Amino acid sequence: MKCLPVIAVHGGAGHWRTKKSLEGILKYIEESLTAGMESILEKNAVEGVLKAVMVLEDSGEFNAGLGSVPNIDGEIEMDAGIMDGSRGDAGAVAAVRYVKNPVLLAYYVLKNTNHVLIVGEGADRLAEQLGLEKMPIRERQRRDPVLSSRFWARKEELTGDTVGAVGIDSECRLAAASSTGGLAGKLKGRVGDTPIPGAGFYADENVAVVATGIGEVITLGALSRRVAEAWQATKRIEIALRLVLNEVNVRYGENTVGLLGVDIYGNVHAEYNTEAMPWGYLRYGENPVIKGLPTRM
Ligand code: GLY
């Protein structure tokens, strides 16, 4: 069986009323889609989602990699995960400070270790041993006097967080990857959904899903895995995503999460209960489509 390659990415669910520019969001989502598709065509779905997320991490425009928001101590601690649906295997890192591209470190955990999740100092040491590019010190200690003076607590402050990608290659292999700086003003050591397989990301032989929003909600609901279960019951990615979002709305309320998924048929869709969630997709041979942009910033 052959499949039409597809890549989809998002730049985070939230209200997006920040200093970020619409032009920047569009530019980097398009660049991420193009780079991700090139890697899917040259290599496979896992490499495609890896590359797509690295472009977003490097942009500085989103809350991941160079754009990560600081924790309560004014330091950045990042989380990332990547999953190969064809092998049912994942790699992830949490609370890392050393590396410029946490998703690349997660990829090394997937490829080169017997582990799934490595955290903190151990993950930083692994990145150093692998010789991965370092996060500039300036970015590692981005003290923000407002954010670092109080603990994030109110959900309406969900500005726009996390980046993620899902993809399928011509051999019908699905993959998902996610990366974040977490919630602004979070407690030191707090880890959200992004590096937890089944919560912030998930892929199997039928679907690949990534989540964005309040990590505690996403983790408690195991939302990415829950979408995969809903897909099994419906065989329609847009219905599966809508069902799970409805469950979240009932249990945890609105302004909490966004979900993006692609299925084995190449259908791609996103659902979110926040003001905006910039996302886009690119099918092989077609032009990129970008949706979910904020209407006021
Ligand atoms: N969704 C990102 C986080 O809560 O850390």
Image (cartoon, grey):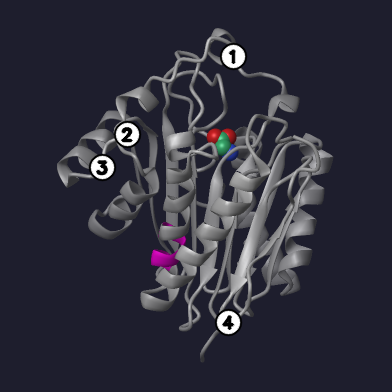
Mark 1 lies on a secondary structure that is loop
Disc 2 target residue: 135
Residue at coordinates 62% horizontally, 78% vertically from top-left? 286
Above or below: residue 233 compared with residue 99: below
* Residue numbers of the magenta segment: 46-50
Q: What is the CA distance from the residue labelled 2 to the residue labelled 4?
A: 35 Å
Ligand 1: give its quadrant: top right
| Residue sitting farthest toward the front | 23
**Three-letter amino acid code of the residue under disc 3:** Glu
Q: What is the CA distance from the residue labelled 4 to the residue labelled 3?
A: 33 Å
Nearer to me, 144 or 186:
144
Q: Position of residue 170 (x, y in %)?
A: 48, 83
Q: Is residue 20 left or right of residue 273?
A: left
Q: Which label is found at residue 76? A: none
Task: Reply yes or no: does residue 49 show up in magenta.
Answer: yes
Residue at coordinates 63% horizontally, 39% vertically from top-left? 220
Q: What is the CA distance from the residue labelled 1 to the residue labelled 3?
A: 30 Å
**Three-letter amino acid code of the residue under disc 4:** Gly
Task: Reply yes or no: does residue 267 show up in magenta.
Answer: no
